[in-house]
Amino acid sequence: MDGGRQTLDRARLGSFERWSSVIGGILGIAGVPGFLANLDQLYEAADIEGQAWREFTAAWWQTFRDQPKKVSELNQFCEERELMLRLRGDGSARSNRSGWATPSVTAVIVPSMDCEWCGLIATRNTKV
């Protein structure tokens, strides 16, 4: 190759750093622009759980602010607003059988206590 051994010096793909660097370099020399240019959008679209959590925490904060809530109240909140459906299921027999989702928000929220979403952290409050 006349272009020498050029590598991609921008975005790299997960554990494929070497591969994406070489392929990016080859495409760059060939004049093909935009290799991995949409990587942020790809990760965002693939992050279904993160999207559901960001939507849920934003709605929770907008509605309740820092008021403590019981999980049963949050479950009703999710039901009324159709939040977290992909994570907690829609209550149908199919979603319950699939193992992909559960019908209650309890199984989704409790393991995620103390995780940060949209700058907010859900914590256990023993006073509720």
Image (cartoon, rainbow, N blue to C red):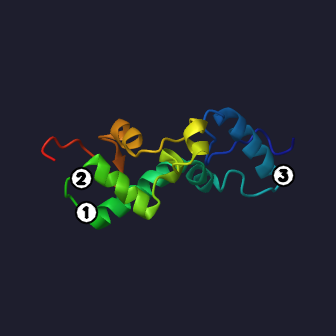
- What residue sits 16% from the left and 47% below the top? 128
Question: Which residue has dot 1 on it?
Answer: 64
Closer to the camera in the image, 84 or 36: 84
Q: In which quarter of the image is residue 83?
A: bottom left
Viewer can see residue 121: no
Q: Which mark is residue 30?
A: 3
- Residue 82 vs 46, above or below: the answer is below
Closer to the camera in the image, 92 or 100: 92
Q: How far apart are marks 3 and 1 (CA)?
A: 55 Å
**Mark 1 touches mark 2? (CB < 8 Å):** yes
Q: What element carries label 1?
A: helix
- What residue sits 24% from the left and 44% below the top? 123
Q: In which quarter of the image is residue 62?
A: bottom left
The residue type indicated by label 1 comes to Phe
Badge 3 or badge 2: first in the primary sequence: 3
The residue type indicated by label 2 comes to Lys
Q: Which mark is residue 69?
A: 2
The residue type indicated by label 3 comes to Ala
Q: Is mark 3 on a helix, strand or loop?
A: loop
- What residue sits 49% from the left and 54% below the top? 51
